[in-house]
Image: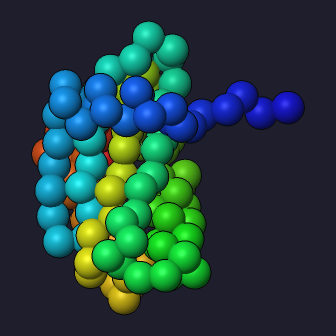
């Protein structure tokens, strides 16, 4: 069975918002904080302002997929929170991926091979 690599608890989210570093663009907000686990963990949120449940769940699935495809290119040992913003609802997958990589680069999370 695969190890759970998600941030789910409310107190973990609040700690990330208060003490984590962040990068903002028009598609998403990325919060990052080091953990002591040796692997990256992800939490995803989408406000009800984005739309109904179907829309929010679609956006969260896209953000999780962007993270999954690029996790191998990131430094390990971080908790990350992805917050969906308005443009991510209608945004192209490639644009969302570029925005994610740009945010990760600003926070110096990308490995040097890229």
Residue 30 in the image, given as x and y percentages of width and height: 27, 49
Across the whole image, how many numbered discs are drawn on residues?
0
- In the rendered view, would you say 20 is above or below 74? above
Q: Does residue 88 appear to the left or right of 5 in the view shown?
A: left
Q: Does residue 75 appear to the left or right of 69 in the view shown?
A: left
Residue 100 seen in the current view: no
Q: Nearer the viewer, residue 48 or 34?
A: 48
The residue at 54%/61% (across/down) is: 65
The residue at 26%/78% (across/down) is: 86
Instruction: Name, please, the residue furthest toward the bottom.
Output: 90
Residue 103 seen in the current view: yes
- In the rendered view, would you say 64 is above or below 48? above
- Is the N terminus in the top left, top right, bottom left or bottom right quadrant? top right
- In the rendered view, would you say 89 is above or below 114? below
Q: Quadrant of residue 100?
A: bottom left
Residue 9 in the image, given as x and y percentages of width and height: 50, 32
Q: Nearer the viewer, residue 65 or 45?
A: 45
The residue at 50%/16% (across/down) is: 38
The residue at 41%/56% (across/down) is: 45
Residue 91 in the image, given as x and y percentages of width and height: 34, 84
Q: Nearer the viewer, residue 18 or 72?
A: 18
Q: Quadrant of residue 88?
A: bottom left
Residue 83 in the image, given as x and y percentages of width and height: 33, 57
Instruction: Name, please, the residue furthest toward the top.
Output: 36
């Amino acid at each position: 069975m695969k190890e759970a690599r998600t941030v789910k608890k409310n107190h973990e989210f609040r700690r990330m918002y208060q003490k984590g570093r962040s990068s903002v663009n028009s598609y998403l907000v990325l919060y990052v904080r080091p953990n002591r686990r040796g692997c990256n963990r992800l939490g995803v949120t989408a406000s009800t302002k984005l739309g109904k449940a179907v829309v929010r769940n679609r956006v969260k699935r896209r953000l999780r997929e962007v993270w999954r495809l690029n996790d191998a290119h990131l430094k390990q040992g971080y908790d990350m929170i992805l917050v969906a913003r308005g443009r991510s609802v209608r945004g192209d997958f490639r644009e969302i991926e570029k925005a994610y990589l740009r945010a990760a680069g600003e926070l110096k999370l990308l490995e040097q091979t890229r």
